[in-house]
Image (cartoon, rainbow, N blue to C red):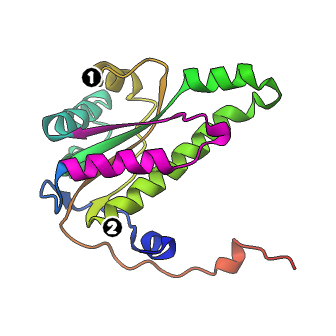
Amino acid sequence: MSIIKSLEKRRTYYNINKDLPVSESEIEEKIKEVTELVPDAFNMKSARAVVLFGEEHDKLWDEIYNVFEGKVSREKIDSFKAGAGTVLYLYDENTVKKMQEEFSTYADNFPVWANQANGMLQISVWSMLKELNVGASLQHYNPVIDEKVKELFDIPKEYKLLAQMPFGGIVSEPEAKEKENIDERVKVIK
């Protein structure tokens, strides 16, 4: 599949379930493969992914609900919990600090570059999941949930949580996207 087709097919799926069309091990292997392939400035390899399946996935979403003390509806949280798994996206602040010390001229840029690399990882995993016919969405309950997530899943304190991606079998397709006037966002100079 071409990158354009892959991005075209990638959508936000809110209506997911626990019935995956592929094995958990295939998803795990593909996430590892994509993580290794995604570039990172100065090859710093700052991005981290934690993949939760089954009860661990369910525990995450129950704890997110608890941390927000009902401020996020149970129905919304349960729509993510209905999936088969979640990818937690993080970056290693120690890796970033090491690069800042090693290349002090660029020190201010390394956190920015770590975020950029993580964004590339997110869209790459999201597109790969769709290629496997697995639906996903990208959520941002951090920083409110950061400490609880680190505690629950034994994640090092120096890992910065950036996003959560619940995924699962596709129950229904989202509505078609409305085409935009892309010339308002892309300027071409010749």
The image position of residue 98, as x and y in percent, is 64, 20
Q: Amino acid at mark 1?
A: Leu
Q: Is residue 46 magenta?
A: yes
- Determine whether the residue tagged by mark 2 lies in a helix, strand or loop: helix
Count the marks: 2
| Residue closest to the eye, 48 or 15 | 48
Residue depicted at x 12% and y 58%: 19
Q: Residue at x 60, y 37 (%)?
A: 114
Q: Looking at the picture, how far across and down is residue 176, in whole percent?
A: 38, 80
Q: Can you tell which mark lies on residue 78?
A: none
Q: Looking at the image, which residue is at 71% across and 24% down?
A: 100
- Residue 90 visible to an observer of this rendering: yes
Q: Nearer the viewer, residue 1 or 117?
A: 1
Position of the C terminus by quadrant: bottom right
Q: Residues within 10 Å of mark 1 (few under 14, many from 20)?
A: few
Left or right position of 98 against 7: right
Residue 152: which numbered mark, if any?
1
Magenta stretch encompasses residue 26: yes
The label shown at residue 131 is: 2
In the drawing, does residue 158 fall left or right of residue 147? right
- The span shown in magenta is 25-52
Residue type for callout 2:
Glu
Q: Is residue 84 visible?
A: no
